[in-house]
Image (cartoon, rainbow, N blue to C red):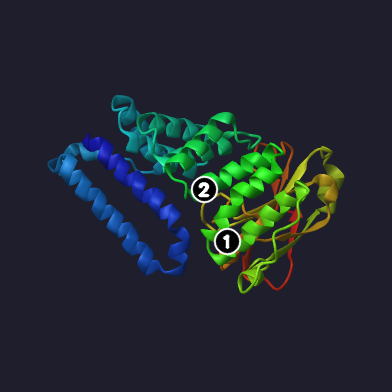
Amino acid sequence: MAVFVAISALLAVLVFAAVLWPLWRESRGIALGAVLALGLAALAVYDLVGTPAAIDAPAVAATPRSMDEAVVQLKAELERHPERADGWQLLARSYEMLDRRPEARDAYARALKLTPDDPDLLVQAAQARLFADPARKIDDQAVAMLRRALELQPQQQRARWFLGVWQRQEGRHAEAAETWAPLLAQVDAATAATLRVQIDAARTAAGLPPLPAAQGPAAATSSANTLTVQVSLDPDFAARVRLRGDASVFVIARIPGGPPMPVAAEKHPLQDLPMTVTLDDADSPMPTQKLSALREVEVFARLSSSGEATRQDGDLDSKPVRVALPATQPVELVIGAK
């Protein structure tokens, strides 16, 4: 058990530090204090359930030295103590940080078997199933999880959001707009402005008129921190390489040095090159992670033969460019340039 707690403490600090990266950039003192507080809390837990004397014992040499090593040891501990729901959740979050999506899905499933009525865990498990699917489709099992989460906690925003995403994927556009509408009263003005774009798109697809125009400051926030990106192929590269006609181009903005998940992304066919793209809050995979909330992003374009945003063998990225927001000039990206 002591080994389990020690590994969990290390993983918790690593995962927590990654989540805090944007805060670290804004206020290093606050972020450092938060990580230190987490470390002290982990030591307190260790003192309660572990063997404090073991800290000075020779066995400390087995302490994991990296996140990958900690994941391996935590998985081994969970095989010996599979009843630890918190351990399975931590393992799942660690897999997410390592971008090992199928393993994160399976770890969340194990945690959910032990705590089936936790609404937040239900949403995490459903989201993990979505991100583990190469087609990014929400399957029936994930839908059941989302509906159960809303039964347990009607104000669960992410459950409502993902349920609407599934309805859009299924062509049930009017239902999606209706599912998302209650969120407008629950989120801040900037998020509401982004969400209105999605709701209006769903209503238009259903043959319904858009929502009445927003009034006040919220109406102006939808265009905040838009980012214009010009993408082209290097001529020499295009001349010597035969490209598949069904290849896709992703234009991606993410937090510099932060998690690999994008804060905004668009997908276009190869035939659109050269092209000009405008990234904004409507291009965020999650309405709670907004481009307009950031002061700096890293932007790049990815040429994908598989059609998947997640990097695959054979994909080619342009040189990333750091951009301070709001940007006053277009960002130029050239795929294949040396």
Label drawn at residue 312: none
**Mark 1 residue element:** helix
Q: Quadrant of the C terminus?
A: bottom right
Q: Find residue 198 and report its horizontal and vertical position in percent.
A: 67, 53
- Mark 1 residue type: Thr
Splitting the image into 4 quarters, where does residue 23 fall? bottom left
How packed mark 2 is, by other alpha carbons closer than 10 Å (few <14, some 14-19, many 20 or more), is: many
Quick check: 252 above or below 294? above
Circle 2 residue: 158
Q: Is residue 133 left or right of residue 269?
A: left
Splitting the image into 4 quarters, where does residue 118 fall? top left
- Residue drawn at 82 percent across, 40 percent down: 243
Q: Residue furthest top?
A: 80
Viewer can see residue 252:
no
How packed mark 1 is, by other alpha carbons closer than 10 Å (few <14, some 14-19, many 20 or more), is: many
Splitting the image into 4 quarters, where does residue 319 fall? bottom right
Query: In the rendered structure, which disc, 1 or 2, sits on the residue that comes first in sequence?
Result: 2
Q: Find residue 336 and report its horizontal and vertical position in percent.
A: 76, 50
- Residue drawn at 30 percent across, 45 percent down: 9
Quick check: 195 above or below 83? below
Q: Find residue 95 and report its horizontal and vertical position in percent.
A: 46, 39
**Mark 2 residue element:** helix
Q: CA distance from mark 1 to mark 2?
A: 13 Å
Q: Is residue 146 left or right of residue 324?
A: left
- Mark 2 residue type: Arg
